[in-house]
Amino acid sequence: MTRHLRRSARVAAATAALLAAALAAPVGASALAGTPSAPAAPPAAASPALAGSDLPAALAEDPTGGKTVVGQTSPIHDPALVIEGDTWYVFSTGRINRENGGTIQIATSHDAGTTWEYSGTIWPEIPAWLDERLPGLDNLWAPEVYEHDGTYYLYYSASVFGTNTSLTALATNTTLDPTDPDYAWVDQGEVVSSPVVGLPNGATFNAIDAGIVEGADGTPWMAIGSFWYGIWLVELEWPSGKPVANWRETAVNIADRFMPGNPIEAPYIYQHDGYYYLFVSFDRCCQGGDSTYKVAVGRATDVTGPYLDKEGRDLFGGGGSVVLDAHGAIVGPGGQSVADGYLAFHYYDASNEQIPFFPTLGIQKIAWVDGWPTFDQTVALPAVTTQPQDVTAAPGDRVELTVAGTGTPRPVAVWETSADGGATWTTVEAQPVTAADGTSTLVLDAAAPSDDGRSWRAVLRNAHGTATSEAATLTVTAPAPPVVTLHPRPVTVPKDATASFTAAASGTPTPSVRWEVSRNGGRSWTAVAYADVETTATAQGATSTLTLTARQGLTGTRYRAVFTGAGETVTTHPATLTVRPKPRS
């Protein structure tokens, strides 16, 4: 069984200013996931789409269009998206200057791709043989992950930026779960390198941005290339995952813009509804706010092409329908991959005030319109429509704080809390889900005295900006032991009539109550078992009424209420029931 998980795109660097900012930033929002800038590398890949009925329920609930992602989403460059059950993975380009080893990094999500956390790298350092082959190598690029017959194949690129002195190499694993005792990425060495000789028509390619796809007959192919002679398909074989012996003779040049610089890269092939869709990135990435990257597509009925765009133009010759371009705070989207109907890409974030145009993860759920992938590029900044409200609660009470908002893409509420009157804020560890209507409710299972005066607010985020709610403050009332405010009064009623006794007590938290009866003048008491009790919590405490049918044998019984709260118990005065015989008619 072969399953295409996903593949990613490439990386490069950015301007010197952006590099400096990245290096100065703290880990977690720091080092760029890139490499230099000229003609260089991106990704490639392909895979059959899952049928809608096969998608996990959580995925089916996402509307088509942009998906807001939060957490550790920067720096991510050339995201290779993998969806495995309840876990989403993004493999991406290593960080520059060998931060964290410079090897392929991993981010994971356990809430259907909304919240992401950095999960380490495939290796602690770049293999020594790569340094020998490519002196001055800074980081590894553009991963692709493909599963075949129980083995995960991870292809990645190594290159001297701005040249086609590059290679694609391979690592394998039997699991993606780092807690599995068998988890280990095994270095399988080189797959292809460039410059390449022996290709048809004396062409060459840049050996980066590998992406794997299988043809209708099960033959595996590797889409690869960046700038030099565009995008190529290289025939592979299983189980090695490496090229067949005569791969140069069977290689196919499937996309070339035939223009100065030939700015095309990051190929990714995705099978959907009878077609192979070739996604590529046009123009230039890695220039920060000046990046001109955009995603274009063509489709074919055979994996080797020809790939035609919406107007019938061949991608080998300048065709390609642009489907995702800069919009709002999203600058230079590209380096794409596809998994289970979701497009993952990186972009340069114009809304990042700390590090402007930092490379960031973007995700869109694809809408298929007339046989073509369509992406929502509507922009609406987040706005708060329902503010969280101040709450007063007793210790142990359940507390709910609710916020709601609008925006496109639909914003996600990230709750923060402050213990110093709003001077500083920290992110709440356990975040609630933001519902489809934009509502998010933060629940405190039990208010604690230490929560008194603490505030909470929600920051609504989407790819284009944020909106911060007003702060809601929790007042936790001090515990107060119960005090009887109403004692039950003696009752005299005819036989078989209804008799009622009422008692009340103040206290914080609201005291609980039980009713007791004595049949021996108050020498001993037992719980009442033959009456109805109705207790109501009030702003002052609790009021309770005991109701029973006055039978002749109950005359002289005494009743009292026992209130318990704040670790203490108080008892009312007893009240006596007198039952008169029914008058004779």
Image (tube, rainbow, N blue to C red):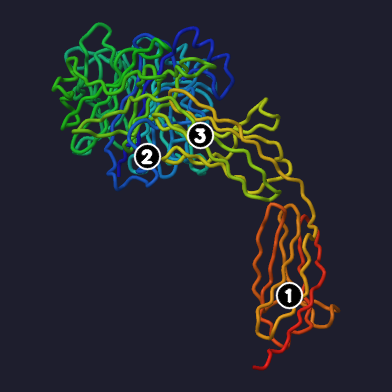
**Image quadrant in which you'd find residue 65:** top left
Q: Residue at x 24, y 26 (%)?
A: 278
- Image quadrant for the C terminus? bottom right
Q: Give the Cα distance between marks 3 and 2.
A: 16 Å
Residue 16: x and y in percent read: 48, 7
Is 74 placed above or below 522 here?
A: above
Q: Which residue is mark 2?
A: 62
Q: Which residue is mark 1?
A: 527
Q: Secondary structure at mark 1?
A: strand
| Mark earlier in primary sequence (3, 2) | 2
| Mark earlier in primary sequence (3, 1) | 3
Q: Look at label 3 and name its amino acid.
A: Ala
Q: Which residue is mark 3?
A: 413
**Image quadrant in which you'd find residue 218:** top left
Q: Look at label 1 and name its amino acid.
A: Ala
Q: Residue furthest bottom?
A: 584
Q: Is residue 267 left or right of residue 58?
A: left
Residue 369's tag is none
**Image quadrant in which you'd find residue 543:** bottom right
Q: Give the Cα distance between marks 1 and 2.
A: 55 Å
Q: Secondary structure at mark 2?
A: loop
Is 252 placed above or below 113 here?
A: above
Evaluate whether residue 143 shows in this view. Answer: yes
Kindly report which numbered mark, 1 or 2, lies closer to the viewer in this rendering: 1
